[in-house]
Image (tube, rainbow, N blue to C red):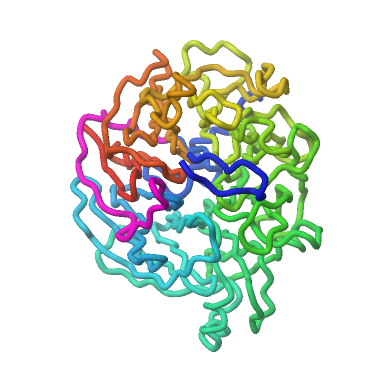
Amino acid sequence: MSSPRILPLLVGLSLCGPILAQDPIRTRPPKGWSGFGNDPQHATQSLVAGQPLDQIHWWAPVDEQPQYSGSALLYHYGSPLSTRHSTIVFPVKTGVSGDFEVQGRRGSDGTLLWTTSTDYIWPPYNWGPSVGCTLTPGNQVALPAAGGTILLRSDADAAVASAPRLAFFGLASYLANQATYDANVFIDTPITSDAAGNLYFGFLVTGATPTGLVSGLARIAANGTGSWVSAATASGDGSMQKVTYNCAPALSHGGASVYVVVNDQATTGFGFGYLLRLNSSTLALQSKVRLQDPSGFDAYLPDDGTASPCVGPDGDVYIGVLENPFPWNNDRGWMLHFDGALSGSELPGAFGWDCTPAVVPASVVPSYSGPSGYLLLTKYNNYAGIGGDGVNKVAVLDPNTAMMDPVTCVNVMDEVLTIAGVTPDPSWTGTYPNAVREWCINTAVVDPLRRSALVNSEDGALYRWDFVTNTFSQSIVLTAGIGEAYTPTMIASDGTVFAINDATLFAVGR
């Protein structure tokens, strides 16, 4: 499908250590699905077994007026959420170029329980940015709103609830200068809540404000107190302009540090920059690392992607980037890997440009006998026409064991399991007979209790990838298929599986 260009002369992007004593599952909310990647570490693991993919229970639009680019849908839709009581919370685009609301629906049958409108405005964009809500430990819904503010709905399960506005720079200043803030300040990442209910998100500033805001990272404490730091100040580099679009902040285990990526593009683009580790209370810099390709050049940090930091159970941090020089790695990018202090670079993965990995307990992959306590699940496309053969896969990788990448001869994470898509891609089969449709996931759900994962494809189907047999043991057709920007999947607290395909949220189960 068609895709954005990095530079006029470059080919366009194609779509689509041992575990420590601390148990990572205990740091997550019981059941439910609280935000992007489920928990503040974005591990994307379910605490309940996903139901069989027998039938579609219900569906609802996440975009009431989708705007197609030929046969493509270039929007990053926000992750659906689930409360402990299986209220499904998700953002809905209601207008042609914006206008949003957030809905709460009964998980069992899709009955609309409540709607909260938001005046949120998109920042300048190429692909539509994700509108990322989150649930707090107190079952509140934090949703982005205009002028860099948020609305905090008091109860995600209640049919009627208050939704006061909070501003990290001061609500009085916002109310006195609303038009100025609305025109110049935009939330540009999903919102992340830590285990105490403190909220973190990136924001973009395009003009002067009464409080002198400069693009960066915002924090709203559980008591409503706001603070912020500019990307330049946070990184100690005056060339840094903002938090990369769609990059959901991640928290370390224990919550002492927040990880975020900043780049040097004033609005949307393909910039260079850093992964930052900041004090989660003060937003002061603790450490940073320049994000570089294994070639030694600065890696691209595209605002058209959704790659966000993932913190492994041992505290290691993973972040996807796009390769430089482009496309020497066949447009696959890299999954860069660092220790938690960002003091040293570890073994990279061979794919990562628009992907947040999911954590797979090693014990749920019976064929694995290596040294690692956990593995990583990632998209593993091999794009036809950009050096690849079109055999697009998903993969489970060992973050601590190396293999030689056949494309670049770089040592990368070893492939524990891989599996290719099943639907031929007629756009490429004439030249590449084994080409199959791409995987359109940005986060795939790991279902440890069923030793499997749920993955969404551009062929319009949802698949269960069985780690025991390395097969697609179940699948269900959702749509006729479309080339689309990457979408999240999740498992609700009752085990219902949710996937977004062609601007629609589908609830699937037994």
Residue at point 55% right, 31% down? 385
Asked if residue 62 lies in the magenta stretch, the reply is: yes
Residue 412, quarter of the rendered image: top right
Regarding residue 199, the answer to whether it shows in the image is no
Which residue in the rendered view is the most extreme toward the bottom? Answer: 176
> Which residues make up the magenta segment?
46-72
Residue extending farthest to the front is 430
Report the predominant secondary structure element of the magenta stretch.
Answer: loop
Check the picture and name the quadrant holding the C terminus.
top left
Whether residue 235 is visible, yes or no, is: yes
Q: Is residue 286 magenta?
A: no
- The picture places residue 378, in percent across and down from the top left corner, at 53, 31
With 180 as the anchor, is 317 left or right in this view? right
Q: Position of residue 122 (x, y in %)?
A: 49, 66
Q: Residue at x 47, y 12 (%)?
A: 366
Please tell me which residue lies in front, 283 or 310.
310
Look at the picture and state if 317 lies above or below 146.
above
Q: Residue at x 26, y 63 (%)?
A: 114
Q: Is residue 37 above or below residue 269?
A: above
Q: Is 202 situated above or below 358?
A: below
Image-quadrant location for residue 131 = bottom left
Q: Residue at x 50, y 40 (%)?
A: 15
Q: Position of residue 151 (x, y in %)?
A: 44, 69
The percent coordinates of residue 276 (x first, y second) are: 71, 50
